[in-house]
Image (cartoon, helix red, strand yellow):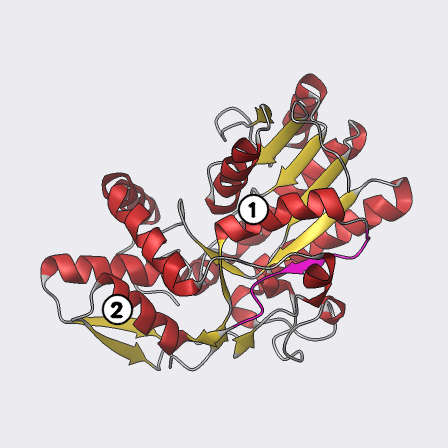
Amino acid sequence: MREIPLDARIYVAGHRGLVGSALVRRLRREGFTRLLTATRAELDLRRPADVERWFARERPEYVLVAAGTVGGIQANASRPAEFLHDNLAIHSSVLHAAFLHPVERLLYFGSSCIYPRECPQPIREESLLTGPLEPTNAPYAVAKIAGVTLCRAYREQYGCDFVAVMPTNLYGPNDDFDPESAHVLPALMHRLHRARRSGRRRVAVWGTGTPRRELMHVDDLADASLFLMRHYEGASHVNVGTGEDLSIRELAERVRDCVAPEVELAFDATKPDGAPRKLLDVSLLRGLGWRARIGLTEGIASTYAWYLAHEGSSRRRVATASAARGGVLQGAA
């Protein structure tokens, strides 16, 4: 096992987001005392020169790259250039700075959307670049594939200890609950909560409900990430998931049963479904000795409790994001 001193300087890029905030929580709980963070106002990760200066000044020893522009089907469809440009810029800037100012280890967080739309299920790490991508999130996927390839290239050419982690679909505290940009679980949670508050009896869900998805609580990802930092010495990217999936209809019903049991779900088959199935093969990670612990029903309940506790701030974030795009809140799956 790799020993990481509790006073190591650990930089969490994207510390306010879903993944980054979970990493910060996990590292603090473990007892790490020198966590480095920077808001976008303090450091724009799309600007290479600024990132290099920050690395030269702060000298991080470990780096967790959880920063990026993310969203569901609607967000990917309406902002493809932004998704591609911002993510390419962020990933290349941070990885290059970590090379110029050498770090002990860097973990780069990709996404299960990097894999081909029609690849065999469950999806093995070897399936990368074996077929066409899912069109509804191709720009984001291309940027993530570039990040994975960059990790491999810096490792091969310069010996950098850069490792790419491929999480499945995530949810939990600090998620994006704006139905216009969010992934399916938080978008449904927000819409169902609004329906319950307003007395509406019906909520629309994009697509047929038949695609299957794997969902993992973000705190499990944070735990797996620290485990990999300490125990994984391979060069391949690593899938991180639960090894279980369910249909979008089943997922919507579970969220509905937690948030607003009296509401009827109406599936809109005119809207896109996305990939028919995304289930990761997590044999590599399980072989190392790690498994997810948080069940989906438990995770949905705890996420909704967090949402209720932060309802005011969540509502302000949703309103601000919607106003900035000049749009009306819509469903997204």
Q: Are marks 2 and 1 in contact (CB under 8 Å)?
A: no
Q: Residue furthest left?
A: 199
Provide residue 322's location: percent of width, then percent of height: 30, 49
Residue sitting at 47 percent across and 42 percent down? Answer: 17
In the picture, the disc for residue 222 is 1
Provide residue 295's location: percent of width, then percent of height: 45, 62
Q: Amino acid at mark 1?
A: Ala
> Which residue occupies the foreground of this view, 57 or 84?
57
Taking the image as shown, residue 76 lies to the left or right of residue 326, namely right
Rendering quarter of residue 184: bottom left
Taking the image as shown, residue 67 lies to the left or right of residue 74, namely right
What residue does disc 2 label? 257
Q: Amino acid at mark 2?
A: Asp
At numbered mark 2, what does the secondary structure look like: helix, strand or loop?
Answer: helix
Q: Is residue 58 above or below residue 204?
A: above
The CA distance from mark 2 to mark 1 is 27 Å
Q: Is residue 147 above or below residue 286?
A: above
Provide residue 291's location: percent of width, then percent of height: 60, 59
Q: Quadrant of the N terminus?
A: top right
Taking the image as shown, residue 129 lies to the left or right of residue 246, namely right
Magenta stretch in the rendered image? 234-244
* Residue 55 seen in the figure: yes
Residue 235 within the magenta-colored segment of the rendering: yes
> Which residue occupies the foreground of this view, 218 or 93?
218
Q: Is residue 125 above or below residue 25?
A: below
> Which residue occupies the foreground of this view, 277 or 328?
277
In the picture, the disc for residue 93 is none
Our reading of the magenta stretch's main secondary structure is: loop
Rendering quarter of residue 65: top right
Residue sitting at 73 percent across and 71 percent down? Answer: 127
At numbered mark 1, what does the secondary structure look like: helix, strand or loop?
Answer: helix
